[in-house]
Image: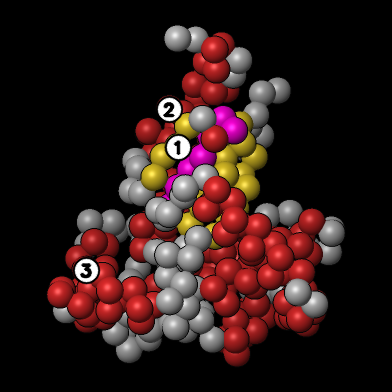
Amino acid sequence: MATVTIDHYSDLLCVWAYIAHARTVELQAQYPDSIDWRWHYLSVFGDVQTKFKDQWQERGGSAGYAAHVLDVLQDFDHVVINPDCWTRVQPASSAPAHLWLAAVRLQEGRGELSPRSEETFAWHLRRAFFRDAADIGSQDELVAQASQCGFEPQPLLDRINDGSAFAVLCQDMLGARQSDISVSPTYVFNNGRQRLTGNVGYRIIEANVKELLEQPHKQQSWC
């Protein structure tokens, strides 16, 4: 059976990745045995305060960005936004949450967590921030969220403390830099030959998947 590998790059604090989660769920439902997802994380919100200062100072700073997020989400009724998100609650960085996801990836790879644990925890953390206004940049909050998601925190902390989770996260960052990926979310297909970035509709993503599944070899050489 033909399969398509999708390298998915995102930042947990990115509103467009939050919106786009429903599209990955639908793709998994329509092609349950045909897509191999590989999750990677970008530091779009690696330094939140500097981002607001550099990119939003002329547009109202953090308050302007919070208003922007609320405005964006008015057009998408499948996701919920907490009014405290980006107003009262502003994580310092998305990196701590990404580090925990790297630890989950390691544990999943070792067979110590069930398949799709990384994906499950990523969605849990996105909702914790956007829907519940939890500060997922806080280590204490991440410990609590891991427990809420059904994970024993200590083995994940062990992967962070021994440096191995940092190594995995650095691999993601290096891969993004080498491929010149800076937009969240970004979908990379066909060993890097095809790329979709940002707020891309479901049908466009599906069309790329279907074409690769139906003609996986011919499309690489046709001109």
Q: Is residue 47 left or right of residue 164?
A: left
Q: Residues within 10 Å of mark 1 (few under 14, many from 20)?
A: some
Q: Which mark is residue 68?
A: 3
Real-space Cα distance between discs 1 and 3? 26 Å
- Disc 2 to disc 3, how far (Cα)? 30 Å
Which quarter of the image is occupied by the N terminus?
top right
As drawn, 22 above or below 84: above
Q: Amino acid at mark 1?
A: Arg
Label 1 element class: strand
Residue 127: numbered disc: none
- Disc number for residue 195: 1
Magenta-colored span: 185-191
Q: Nearer the viewer, mark 2 or mark 1?
A: 1
**In percent of the image, x 33 and y 48: which residue is there?**
199
On the image, the x and y values in percent for residue 66 come to 25, 76
Given contact means CB atoms under 8 Å apart, are the residues at marks 2 and 1 in contact? Answer: no
From where the camera sits, is residue 222 visible? yes
Q: Position of residue 120 (x, y in %)?
A: 61, 61
51 shown above or below 10: below
Q: Quadrant of the C terminus?
A: top left
136 vs 104, left or right, is left
Q: Is residue 198 above or below residue 101?
A: above
**Among the two numbered marks 1 and 3 on one chain, the one whose residue lies closer to the N terminus:** 3
CA–CA distance between discs 2 and 1? 12 Å
Circle number at residue 207? 2
- Tell me, yes or no, whether the highlighted magenta stretch contains residue 34: no
Q: Look at discs 1 and 3 and give the one toward the viewer.
A: 1
Q: Residue at x 41, y 39 (%)?
A: 196
Q: Is residue 129 something that shows in the picture?
A: no
- The type of residue carrying mark 3 is His
